[in-house]
Image: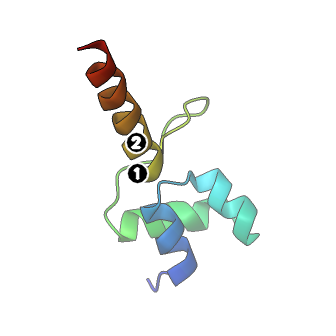
C-alpha cells in the first residue's frame, strides 16, 4: 500500500484517525490502513484525546519549571 505523505506526516505528529480524515477529506478507514502500514500504534479510543509530541514536551517543560520554583 502506498501511504500518502500527508497522512503519514499527520500520523507521526500524533493526530487521530478521525482528525486526519476530516482534514484530508478521506475515509477514516484509509487513515487506519495507513497507520497499520506504517506500523504505528492504534489510535486512541473515542473520548480520549492523545497529546502530540509538542504538547507532551510543553507539559514536561511546565512540570520541570514548577518543580524548580518549588525547590
Vertical side of 57 occupied by 34: above or below:
below
Q: Is residue 10 visible?
A: yes
**Colour scheme:** rainbow
Q: Residue at x 68, y 62 (%)?
A: 21
**Residue 53: which disc?**
1
Residue 54 picture location, percent across and down: 44, 51
Tag 1, which secondary structure? helix
Q: State if disc 2 and disc 1 touch (CB < 8 Å).
A: yes
Vertical side of 46 occupied by 66: above or below:
above
Q: CA distance from mark 1 to mark 2?
A: 5 Å
Q: Is residue 4 visible?
A: no
Q: Residue at x 76, y 69 (%)?
A: 25
Residue 17 picture location, percent across and down: 58, 55
Residue 24 picture location, percent across and down: 71, 71
Left or right: residue 9 compared with residue 40: right
Residue 50 picture location, percent across and down: 49, 39
- Quarter holding the N terminus? bottom left
The residue pinned by badge 2 equals 56
Q: Residue at x 54, y 54 (%)?
A: 15
Amino acid at each position: 500500500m502506498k501511504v500518502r505523505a500527508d497522512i503519514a506526516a499527520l500520523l507521526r505528529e500524533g493526530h487521530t484517525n478521525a482528525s486526519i480524515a476530516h482534514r484530508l477529506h478521506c475515509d477514516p478507514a484509509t487513515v487506519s490502513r495507513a497507520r497499520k502500514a506504517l506500523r504505528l500504534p492504534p489510535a486512541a479510543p473515542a473520548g480520549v484525546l492523545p497529546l502530540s509530541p509538542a504538547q507532551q514536551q510543553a507539559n514536561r517543560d511546565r512540570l520541570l519549571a514548577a518543580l524548580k520554583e518549588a525547590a
